[in-house]
Amino acid sequence: MKQSDLFTKTRKEAPKDEVSRNAQLLTMAGFVHKEMAGVYTYLPLGLRALRKIENIIREEMNAIGGQEMLMTTLQDPELWKKTDRWVSEDVDPSTGMPWFKTELASGGELGIANTHEEALTNIMKNHIASYKDLPKYPYQIQNKFRNEFRAKSGLMRGREFLMKDLYSFTRTNEELEDFYEKCAEAYMRIFKRAGLGDITYRTFASGGSFSKFSDEFQTLSEAGEDTIYLDEKKNIAVNKEVYTDDILEELSLDKKNLKEVKAIEVGNIFRLGTKFSEALGLTYTDDSGNENPVVMGSYGIGLGRLMGTVVEVYNDENGIIWPEEIAPFKVHLLSLSSEGEPKKQADEIYEKLLADGVEVLYDNRQDTSAGQKFAEADLIGIPYRVVVSKKSLKSGGVEIKQRGTDDAKVISVDELFKTV
Ligand code: ATP
Ligand code: MG
């Protein structure tokens, strides 16, 4: 893409009302636009990074048997009354849900979905009858709406945000356990591919409806809202919310080996058991003809939170440093001349990179100074910066530098194509 065609502009100053680093940088670099607290639009660069994240998640979910679908935002209150989850947090903060609700013009309330256990359990009643129909793993990547009390962490805590939510429908607890572990491994692959592998830990957290624990995936960061106790050797952690002497004993963890750290919950998986299937009447007949409730689990990842986390972790004073797999482009090509041989070379390199299928943002702007181009390239944070100028051509080619490193070097044009 030519930068002269990109409609977004960068800005030098962080918006005054943003306190979180991720929202500051993503706004300055032109990735997102804040509509109001906790509500963000993805601009073209932001959408490109988001799509990368989405595709990683989709690939990994498909690889463990996930089947993608898309459920509705508007929700029927009657379903939620059957599970006692129609009650709002403002009514009962301990058991209530963070609802946004609305009303039909013709009268009657509707819900705006904050999660989809009820809706999907009800749908599956039409599709699951016998043990032969199980197991099944539907999922979606869809906007959720939550009336969060505070929205202060930029993309990491929104009131409208994209979530991947997968739900498992299995015959037995063993079958649930089997998939649960598979999904936990897939989650670690996702976070690794997003660049967070070395600093993301599976963490024991409060369990929800069925089991004692759920598993959170916590990425170490000072910007995190959660406190966890980490055993680096054993590669596991415990969330402060379940941290007691009894629990440590149960998990065979020794206080001496635990480090208290701040972390961001990028994903969460739950064993649901039969809570939803029993409340909503989702059953299957087993091979002896007996009717049993279906055993369920739910598995979430917030895509915006994941993007925000990556930005919190990978930045410097000049801007974002995108990990390669989720960067909006792989190469940022900067042309410093508006005419002559350098301009011609830069145009040719751009066309050839495109023809080779390399994702490249081409800063071909004529009215922008070299200094401004360098500053914007650092702010946007694309992994490879490639500069074509009179000077670089004189030294034998183009200057290439990886974002986040200082070692710019001149390589030949042939070598450039081999490198990227
Ligand atoms: P939290 O404890 O942070 O409020 P949660 O436990 O309520 O989150 P889940 O219902 O487990 O969240 O949602 C699954 C995933 O969706 C979370 O792990 C997180 O990545 C993401 N998520 C949850 N709430 C938000 C939000 N308000 N904004 C962005 N992402 C969110
Ligand atoms: Mg959670």
Image: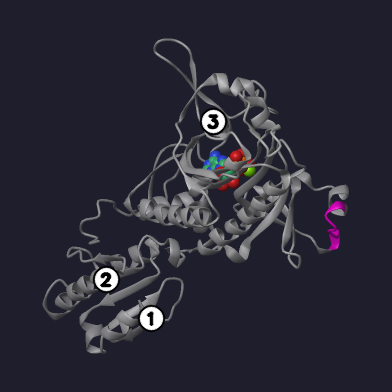
Three-letter code, disc 2: Leu
Task: Point out the stretch of residues depicted in magenta.
Answer: 250-256
- Neighbour class for label 3 at 10 Å: few (<14), some, many (≥20)? some
Q: Quadrant of ligand 1?
A: top right
Residue count near mark 1 (Cα–Cα under 10 Å), binned few <14, some 14–19, many ≥20: some
Q: Does residue 274 show up magenta in the picture?
A: no
- Give the residue pinned by disc 3: 147
Q: Which of marks 3 and 2 is in front?
A: 3
Q: Which amino acid does label 3 sit on?
A: Asn
Disc 3, SS? loop
Question: In which image quadrant can residue 260 be found?
Answer: bottom right
Give the left or right position of residue 189, taking residue 395 as reference. right
Q: Which residue is drawn at 70% across and 53% down?
A: 203
Q: Which of 172 and 63 is in front in this view?
A: 172
- Residue 348 drawn at (x, y percent): 18, 75
Q: Are marks 2 and 1 in contact (CB under 8 Å)?
A: no
Q: Is mark 2 on a helix, strand or loop?
A: strand
- Nearer the observer: mark 1 or 3; the answer is 3
Across and down, in percent, residue 131 comes to 63, 40
Q: In this view, does 31 lie to the left or right of 288?
A: left
Task: Please tell me the numbered disc located at residue 408.
Answer: 1
